[in-house]
Image: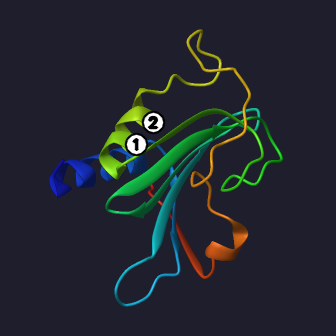
Amino acid sequence: MTSTELDALLSRIGRQRFLAHAFRPDRNGPDVLAFVRYWAGGTADVVIVFDEARASAFRTAGSGADVFAPELVSWWYLNNPVWTLRALMALPEPGHPDEPVEIMRPPPGCLLPAGGRMPVLVRARLP
């Protein structure tokens, strides 16, 4: 795992229209980074980078969910940021025959509760 690979993966998700969220940013950088891609029908793919050793990704199970703390997901992954971003990039789009469809509760440590989200800076990469 190299920071170069992590930088390339973060750049790639930016090009794929993920919205970037930086939580509790200050002069030293954000405490937590999160990226969200919304799909038609209300589903969202989310990746949360907690630190250089831990990240989570998941797909929300429908519209109306709090995208950073949904009660139900159809897929989840926990690992370091590089492996988590790789897994998210390999996830089939909603509607694809190989899309995960089993609905489940996400495991502890996968979500970002509302109390850990302020202040926030949101950025979108423009084409």
Task: Name, please, the residue furthest toward the front.
Answer: 108
Which residue, given by chain and number where applicable, does mark 2 sit on? 88
- Name the amino acid type tagged 1: Thr
Q: Quadrant of residue 121?
A: bottom right
> Which sits in the foreground, 42 or 58?
58
Residue at x-position 38% and y-position 43%:
85
Disc number placed over residue 110 in the picture, else none = none
Which residue, given by chain and number where applicable, does mark 1 sit on? 84
Residue at x-position 74% and y-position 27%:
103
Seen in the picture, residue 60 relative to 100 is either above or below; the reply is: below
Does residue 20 appear left or right of residue 108 in this picture? Answer: left
> Which sits in the foreground, 126 or 84?
84
Q: Quadrant of residue 50?
A: bottom left
Residue 117 visible somewhere in the drawing: no
Q: Secondary structure at mark 1?
A: helix
Residue 72 x, y percent position in the rendering? 75, 39
Seen in the picture, residue 27 relative to 109 is either above or below; the reply is: below
Residue 90 x, y percent position in the rendering? 41, 27
Residue 17 x, y percent position in the rendering? 49, 46
